[in-house]
Image (cartoon, helix red, strand yellow):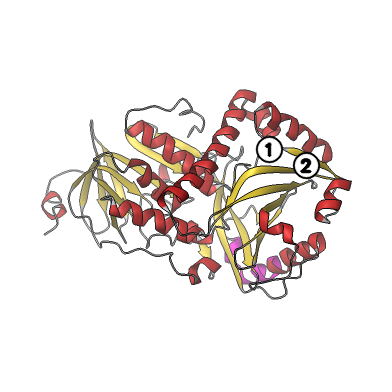
Amino acid sequence: MPEHVAFATRNIPLKDSPTLTRRQALHRHQSLWATLPGGSIKTYGSARRSHYDVIIVGAGISGALMANALIGKRLRILLVDRRQPVHGSSLASTAMIQHEIDTPLHALAKLVGTRKAQRIWQRSAGAVEQLGRLVSDLNLKCAFRAKKSLFLAGDEYGARALRMEVDARVQAGLGAEFLDAHTLHRRFSIERSAAIESAVSASANPAQLTAAILRTAKKEGVEIASPVEIKDLMPLDDAVILSTSQGWLLSARAVVFCTGYEFLDSLASKRQQIVSTWALASRPRLKKPGWLNDYLVWEGAEPYLYFRSTSDGRVILGGEDENAEAAYKDEDKRRQKTKILVDKLADLTGISIGRPDFEWSAAFGVTPDGLPMIGRVPDMENVFVAMGFGGNGITFSQIAATLISGEILGHRDPDWDLFPIS
């Protein structure tokens, strides 16, 4: 009999709330990743004991990387999710793993200061490199491939802004090359006023990546239980008590909410906004320029287009984001957005998608400065959150895993305060 049965009889007062985190239908329709093997993992139906050192809430890429950062430390770790692992936002990702965040470095410096902006971008580049080493060291089968990035001038950031951006990146020690209109056309046959070429990016199959990390964590003793809904929590002096929808009470020395865009309810009104986005994948072996195999492409426009290729010759593209929480659920809008994305790609590159093999839409969270929220929940010493990742979910997830695991293990990172919650 699981130990939590006995623990649940203790008289610990917890308020009866229906859920602790905002519930979102995180994506609609079937993404490419849902059809490929290697993106699932077996789980327990319940926790096997009542007390743990760390409980991680959320079994997507954020929770997987958090668990990986804590293994090998003789900790009892439980990872739970209200869904099956990998079936949240990770399944909808286009997995353009970039060190370039949505807010350009020179623009971010005006918001948070030059030194802090530089550290954020440097940590982002370091996170991509960490992911590459993790995939290599663990021999993860997830179509991970190092790539370059091509950032095109658009109606929001033109040639002058891109020159400023290159200068800012060079000053931060980050490689970047300014391409004028002539050079851009000669090398890529793209008609734009300018572009920035940079390294330290990658792509992957996000479902396979997440599941492979979870399988490694499971082999190292991490318990994974789903579906398990966390209803409420109560922090004590040296522990946190959690109640579940199954009627269990669990305790841990530390709890980490890796719930991405399903914000912890008490923090959901602080800075975050839920928006809608659309993505699609072409048929395999699509005719396209050879250079696309080595690049991730996006543009300084609003809304912006982004695209990449896959190992089987598909083109994945997305964008057309809208500041509307429920827009991604609209079927007519999905058809409209698909046509806009296909036409934009054809106009820019000459690539003809035709009818996509896969179309999907999703909700995701953004903040005014494009930065996530990573840290302790106010007034809860042993409760941590990693959420609001915007367009850099995988990269920021790796940063969150490093920062929060260090805090739990008693090794405060010098960049601990880079991503404040309030």
Q: Is label 2 in contact with label 1 (beta carbons under 8 Å)?
A: yes
Badge 1 amino acid: Pro
Q: Residue at x 86, y 52 (%)?
A: 186
Residue 104 got which mark? 1
Task: Decide if residue 6 is on the left or right side of residue 205.
Answer: left
In the rendered image, residue 329 lying in the magenta stretch gets the answer yes
Asked whether residue 268 is in view, the answer is no
Q: Nearer the viewer, residue 210 or 235?
A: 210
Taking the image as shown, residue 332 lies to the left or right of residue 257, namely right
Residue assigned mark 2 = 157
Res 224 visible: yes
Stretch in magenta:
327-337
Q: Earlier in the sequence, mark 2 or mark 1?
A: 1
Q: Please, what secondary structure does the residue beneath circle 1 have?
A: loop
Q: What amino acid type is highlighted by mark number 2?
A: Tyr
Q: Position of residue 235 (x, y in %)?
A: 27, 36
Horizontal arrangement in the rendering, residue 260 relative to residue 243 (left or right)? right
